[in-house]
Image (spheres, helix red, strand yellow):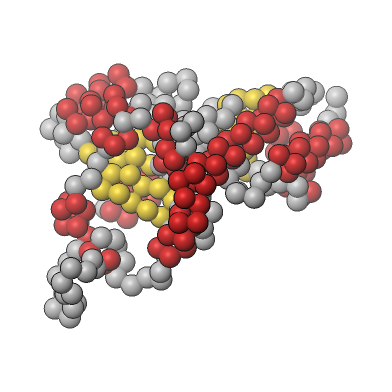
Amino acid sequence: TLLRALRHLGIGTNAVVHVAQLEDGTIDVAALEAELARDPNHLTIVSLAAGDLNRGAFDSFDACCEIAHKYGAWVHVDGAFGLWASASPRFEHLTKGIERADSWATDAHKWLNVPYDSGLVFVADKEAHRGAMSIPAAYAVDVEGVRDQFEWGPEWSRRARGFPVYAALRSLGRRGMAELVENSCDLAKSLVEQLGELPEVEVLSAPVINQGLVRFLDAGGDHDTFTERIINAINATGEGWFGPTTWRGMRVMRISVCNYRTTQADIDRVVAAFRAALREHSSG
Ligand SMILES: Cc1ncc(COP(=O)(O)O)c(C=O)c1O
């Protein structure tokens, strides 16, 4: 999505520099500094992740913001999932330092479980935000003291997306949001741990929050094909839905638990379905 945003903005994807990552999937802070130091006067946006797509990794926000700001860069945090973790006393340490970033993006249609396209953006510099979005129009009626939404987002007309977001946040409250986050994380951990006990399963990434990565080992050695086969078999049962991805050159299965209605019983049921699928499809 970051690449698409850059295309839409006209910045283009050729302007992107990928900074090296550490083994845990977070940005290598020394590599970030080396990259910024190569051309200190270049206008740069440093994009960090709070809960990356595959592993749920959180970058070192304090250190990255310190360095990026030293070189005059704008720091953006993609927290589509991860920003919600800051609602939980158990997980908020992961987001330490995000308050130093210049902008955040998150999705209410992910962990808050409201309908699609409820994206949220937060910009620390109010005037920069408004300056980028607002445009004078002779026919726009200025009502004193009323915030005009078209001055803060790319659309002039839109449905009332804020309503379900507000209703969900009001009904959950801070504690309800924390419980939603913690429940999903505990269930993701349980699912990965239970799968990890099966001989045909290799756990590649245990959950940092609510995501994990596993693959299925084939007795004949073709783990990629076997992993695809097991994912398709599980999805066909309807007991759960899991997506495949390629990670470090391997076909792997993504695990993400985010529905507020998911229970331990659901997790145990889906583990039973995996056991059955592995029994049926294993050649060993
Ligand atoms: C970290 C992260 N960023 C961005 C996105 C894209 O979100 P959307 O499809 O709502 O634009 C996702 C979707 O899974 C994500 O996990």
Relative to 95, say whether 232 is above or below: below
Left or right: 163 as drawn, with respect to 70: right
User: Residue 73: x, y in percent?
Assistant: 20, 35
Residue visible at 45% across and 56% down in the picture: 170
Q: Viewer-proximal residue, 218 or 72?
A: 72
- Name the residue at the bottom extreme: 139
Rendering quarter of residue 161? bottom left
Residue visible at 68% across and 33% down in the picture: 191
Rendering quarter of residue 228? top right
The C terminus - image quarter: top right
User: Residue 3: x, y in percent?
Assistant: 37, 46
Rendering quarter of residue 102? top left
User: Residue 160: x, y in percent?
Assistant: 40, 69
Relative to 210, say whether 7 is above or below: below
Can residue 245 be seen? Answer: no
User: Residue 69: x, y in percent?
Assistant: 19, 31
Relative to 141, say whether 65 is above or below: above
Residue visible at 19% across and 63% down in the picture: 134
Can residue 60 be seen? Answer: yes
